[in-house]
Image: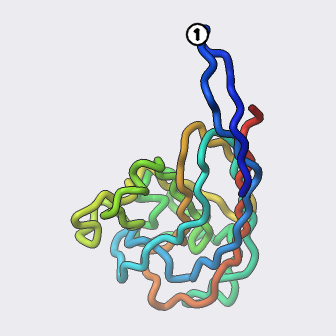
Amino acid sequence: MSHTIQSILCLGLLIPVCCWGDSTTTVTVSGQTSGAFGLPSDATIPFVLAIVAPGPGAITVTATGCVTDVGVSCATADGFSFNGGTTPLQEAGVAGNPDLHVDGLIGALVPAAVAANPTFKPVDSSKSACAPGPCIDRGQLFFIGSSKVFSVSQPSTLYLGIDDFIILDNGGAFTVTVTFTPCHC
């Protein structure tokens, strides 16, 4: 990742501004990466750190691969429809019943200051595995699927996981490529 220092005129003052170049990373998200979200949750496998966005810009996510589950030989990153239990996206209030994205790729965008805390854990903040915290709040969860582009307005860290609550019977993984593109200076 490269960056340059430029200045902008703000309220009559020249203020230095750091401008970053694009950065891309590829991570693997196991079919058991639920961050202890969902009810009941049978294990605590933390979300995977995908990318740090140092400032305003756009994040592009693409995912390939598949997750296996009981009765499902290959769920893509878009997931499948399921009715029963409470998935992480249902727990967060962003999925209905049935949840159309079970075993799909989900994310949580965490403010950089929170993620930088030495006691931060990329797991559900409402579960005992979070102690002493801070952790990911349910309201930070959102569906990504096989492809998504979204904006960030502040320094943030993207974490990735799976929309499932019973994960120990899962296999497989998604290979996820994530690119941060900064706003133009």
| Residue at figure coordinates x 60%, y 42% from the top left | 55
Tell me the quarter of the picture where residue 31 sits: bottom right
For the residue carrying disc 1, how many other residues have a C-alpha within 10 Å: few (<14), some (14-19), or many (20+)?
few
Q: In which quarter of the image is the N terminus?
A: bottom right
Q: Which residue lies furthest to the top in this view?
A: 12
User: Residue 167 location in percent, x, y?
Assistant: 46, 83
| Residue at figure coordinates x 49%, y 55% from the top left | 141
Residue toward you, 126 or 131: 131
Q: How does the figure colour the protein chain or chains? A: rainbow
Q: Quadrant of the C terminus?
A: top right
11 over 134 or under it: above or below = above
Q: Name the residue under label 1.
A: 11
Q: Could you tell whether 50 is left or right of 3 in the image?
A: left
| Residue at figure coordinates x 76%, y 49% from the top left | 21
Q: Could you tell whether 167 is left or right of 184 in the image?
A: left
For the residue marked with disc 1, what is the amino acid? Leu
User: Residue 68 location in percent, x, y?
Assistant: 62, 87
| Residue at figure coordinates x 30%, y 64% from the top left | 119
State how many labels appear. 1
Residue toward you, 136 or 51: 51
Residue toward you, 127 or 169: 127
Looking at the image, can residue 24 be seen?
yes
Tell me the quarter of the picture where residue 151 sits: top right
User: Residue 15 location in percent, x, y?
Assistant: 60, 24
Looking at the image, can residue 148 be seen?
no
128 over 9 or under it: above or below = below
Q: Could you tell whether 112 is left or right of 66 in the image?
A: left
Tell me the quarter of the picture where residue 177 sits: bottom right
Element under disc 1: loop
